[in-house]
Image (cartoon, coloured by chain):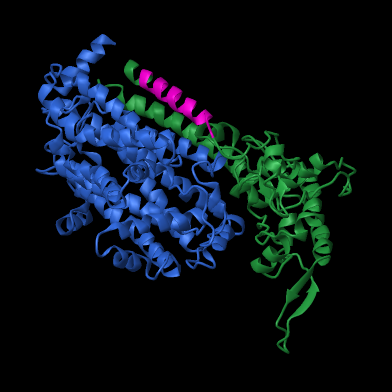
Chain colours: A blue, B green
């Protein structure tokens, strides 16, 4: 968004303020007048949903901290105190706990939407890469948050994940000890995770501002993937998308509320209602559902160091996605072969998640390896080759043309 | 869209099929409780009976540290009266102190006291029982009756059913397994950590006499105490479901309004 603003202060106070800090104009330009493609479908509402979820998590989190005690002897009971004795503590705690899962459901849909419609392609590479970093910070934040109730899976999850760093050659043990703040997962670990869990959401908020900034330079992608040709292709963000996003947000909140009120522990692990015990290892240590695909990749590689490398690569490879996909056509709607491979990839990710939830035995190991291989092949082989081999369908001349053609069909 | 639907069906079939084949302990008996479902509430009389089973049987070895006597009078719980809680708390001996002379002393329990534990520490509890009897405050949330992503979504996690199944699940071990019987353990296929449990069968028919004259076979007492422990683990369940219903009505109306406003806003724009 550049050029002159539509905001013209009328009152003397408004003029005085505008000359000194044009923040009202800024908000009007970016949150109200911003020209947005008029053909965005509901998959595009997840950006707004994510912003709402971040705010929900920050607010509920701040209230939880007022009652939580970050100490190995008191953490578990202080969470139970919140559940039992704090007014509406159960609500705040269940909202925060399930909010994390909802945040990840929304972010996965948001990411897959970007992948299908080629939202990572020029000129939106930086926008996409900031998104990948947001996702990484989210994962770190959620991981440290899960440790705080100090249940069995909090403790053993923290132990397994921090132990991964010991695979680093030469300095591994040193790094692990440094992360723990001691020689095992203990009170110093809990304290630093608490500190960082409070800090990182604000880092996320900052990254989200960068993400929106990087969005507002080229403007939104859209389901056709073709660029906006003029004002006839767009509508102002407000009221068109404030209403559409608003409606989607409320529907998402209904989905969220169903879990908070009627299945608050469904997404979690029952073992985490047993206080942490360093002397008793749970039968199956597994992370929260949103990490399971990566956990499956980690365990599919027989070597610890290479497993860790594979796991981190599986996320970091997303940073290279804009250059791995060689097709100039953004939207999957016009790429018949890509479309099939996209859905196969989605299913592979879900299947990896399923494998991650299972003990690494029998056929799960073999399937884990096949799916892990496919995950990387999708990025390194399929996407680069598809762009060169596939013949895309003819693109519409403009967003308006496409919209009108569809209206005629209907 | 058609392709998407096909994939969804394929994925559901694939994972539904795999999810059926679960391993681990025998799934808990699928009995139903009054507090299940979106409108389910606790049966007050059942919770009061369950409390009696807890006090006369379970409390001999198991602690329940997160509960105070006063909780028994809380809304959405067993609904004992304040007076009942007072006299019931007084039947417990509680350690207090130090007094002005610096000495610890024993006194009768008050409603504000936590339930006292039967053993002074985990080591004493383990030494007396051969294994640590777990704290019961959260037991129905800390155990799963069955597994499976879809199974738990439709049927719940099954914690209360797990407790019921363990209490009623003592069996004569099959001949081939009986040979492996460890010293001082009992065969119980529902027990989550292998089939051998250190707890002797805790209930026998007619063991606890209920004030309301309700049946007191092992099966009845197990059900009552499982319901009581479901309440101790989730004392705000009724408030939660009630609030949830109100929140959902509010959100549904709001969503409807938003939808029509959105439709009206977009009416003039082809999109």
Query: Above or below — where is B142 with respect to B168?
Result: below
Residue occupying the point 36% across, 34% down: A366
Residue A379 appears in the picture as rendered? yes
Residue A196 at x, y percent in the picture = 35, 62
Q: Nearer the viewer, residue A232 or B217?
A: B217
Looking at the image, the residue that sits furthest to the top is A409
Residue A129 at x, y percent in the picture = 19, 45
Q: Nearer the viewer, residue A366 or A107?
A: A366
Query: Is residue B19 highlighted in magenta?
Result: yes
Query: Is residue A165 highlighted in magenta?
Result: no
Query: Above or below — where is A198 with respect to B249?
Result: below
Question: Left or right of B266: which side holds A18?
Answer: left
Q: Quadrant of the N terminus of chain B?
A: top left
Question: Left or right of A247: which side holds B125?
Answer: right
Answer with the quarter of the image where residue B145 lies: top right
Q: Nearer the viewer, residue A79 or A256?
A: A79
Q: Main secondary structure of the magenta part?
A: helix
Q: Which residues are magenta?
A: B6-22
Question: Left or right of B189: which side holds B80?
Answer: right
Q: Nearer the viewer, residue A391 or A257?
A: A391
Looking at the rendered structure, the number of numbered marks drawn on it comes to 0
Q: Quadrant of the C terminus of chain B?
A: top left
Residue B134 at x, y percent in the picture = 65, 57
Residue occupying the point 34% across, 61% down: A199
Query: Above or below — where is B245 with respect to A231?
Result: below
Answer with the quarter of the image where residue A217 lies: top left
Residue occupying the point 49% across, 32% down: B253
Looking at the image, the residue that sits furthest to the bottom is B101
Residue A226 appears in the picture as rendered? no
Residue A330 at x, y percent in the picture = 16, 28
Question: Left or right of A370: which side holds B117?
Answer: right
């Amino acid at each position: 968004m550049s050029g002159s603003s539509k905001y013209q202060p009328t009152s003397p106070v408004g003029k005085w303020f505008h000359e000194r800090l044009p923040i009202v104009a800024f908000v009007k330009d970016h949150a109200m007048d911003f020209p947005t493609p008029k053909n965005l479908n509901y998959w595009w509402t997840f950006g707004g949903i994510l912003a709402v979820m971040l705010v929900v998590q920050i607010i509920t989190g701040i209230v939880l901290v007022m009652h939580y005690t970050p100490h190995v002897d008191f953490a578990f009971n202080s969470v139970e105190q919140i559940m039992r004795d704090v007014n509406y503590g159960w609500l705040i705690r269940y909202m925060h706990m399930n909010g994390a899962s909802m945040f990840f459901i929304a972010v996965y849909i948001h990411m897959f939407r970007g992948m299908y419609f080629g939202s990572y392609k020029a000129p939106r590479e930086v926008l996409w890469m900031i998104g990948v970093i947001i996702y990484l910070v989210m994962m770190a934040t959620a991981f440290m948050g899960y440790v705080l109730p100090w249940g069995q899976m909090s403790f053993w999850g923290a132990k397994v994940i921090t132990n991964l760093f010991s695979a680093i050659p030469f300095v591994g043990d040193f790094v692990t000890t440094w992360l723990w703040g001691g020689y095992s997962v203990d009170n110093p670990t809990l304290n630093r995770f608490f500190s960082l869990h409070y800090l990182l959401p604000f880092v996320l908020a900052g990254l989200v501002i960068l993400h929106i900034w990087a969005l507002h330079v080229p403007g939104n992608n859209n389901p056709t993937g073709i660029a906006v040709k003029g004002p006839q292709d767009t509508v102002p963000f407000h009221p068109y998308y404030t209403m559409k996003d608003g409606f989607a947000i409320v529907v998402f909140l209904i989905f969220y509320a169903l879990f908070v009120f009627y299945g608050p522990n469904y997404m979690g692990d029952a073992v985490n209602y047993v206080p942490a015990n360093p002397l008793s290892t749970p039968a199956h240590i597994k992370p929260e559902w949103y990490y399971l695909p990566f956990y499956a990749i980690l365990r599919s590689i027989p070597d610890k160091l290479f497993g860790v490398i594979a796991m981190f690569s599986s996320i970091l490879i997303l940073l290279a996605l804009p250059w791995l996909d060689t097709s100039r056509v953004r939207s999957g709607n016009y790429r018949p072969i890509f479309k099939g491979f996209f859905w196969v990839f989605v299913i592979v990710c879900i299947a990896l998640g399923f494998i991650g939830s299972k003990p690494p035995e029998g056929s799960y190991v073999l399937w884990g390896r096949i799916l892990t291989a496919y995950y990387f092949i999708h990025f390194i082989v399929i996407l680069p080759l598809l762009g060169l081999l596939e013949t895309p369908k003819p693109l519409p001349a403009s967003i308006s043309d496409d919209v009108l053609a569809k209206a005629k069909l209907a | 869209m058609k392709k998407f639907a096909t994939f969804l069906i394929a994925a559901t079939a694939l994972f539904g099929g795999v999810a059926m084949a679960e391993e681990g302990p025998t799934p808990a008996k699928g009995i139903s409780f009054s507090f299940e479902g979106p409108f389910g509430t606790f049966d007050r009389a059942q919770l009061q009976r369950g409390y009696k089973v807890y006090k006369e049987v379970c409390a001999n070895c198991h602690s329940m540290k997160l509960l105070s006597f006063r909780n028994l009078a809380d809304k959405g719980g067993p609904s004992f009266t304040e007076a009942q809680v007072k006299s019931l708390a007084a039947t417990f001996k509680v350690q207090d102190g130090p007094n002005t002379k610096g000495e610890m002393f024993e006194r009768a329990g008050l409603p504000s006291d936590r339930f006292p534990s039967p053993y002074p520490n985990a080591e004493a509890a383990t030494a007396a029982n051969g294994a640590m009897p777990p704290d019961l405050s959260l037991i129905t949330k800390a155990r799963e009756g069955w597994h499976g992503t879809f199974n738990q979504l439709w049927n719940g996690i099954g914690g209360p059913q797990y407790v019921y199944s363990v209490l009623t699940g003592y069996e004569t071990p099959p001949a081939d397994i009986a040979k492996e019987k460890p010293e001082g353990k009992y065969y119980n296929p529902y027990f989550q950590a292998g089939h051998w449990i250190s707890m002797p069968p805790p209930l026998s028919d007619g063991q606890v006499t209920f004030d309301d004259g309700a049946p007191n076979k092992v099966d009845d007492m197990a059900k009552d105490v499982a319901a009581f422990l479901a309440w101790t683990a989730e004392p705000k369940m009724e408030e939660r479901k009630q609030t949830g219903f109100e929140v959902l009505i509010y959100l549904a109306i709001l969503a409807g309004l938003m939808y029509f406003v959105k439709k009206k806003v977009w009416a003039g724009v082809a999109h």
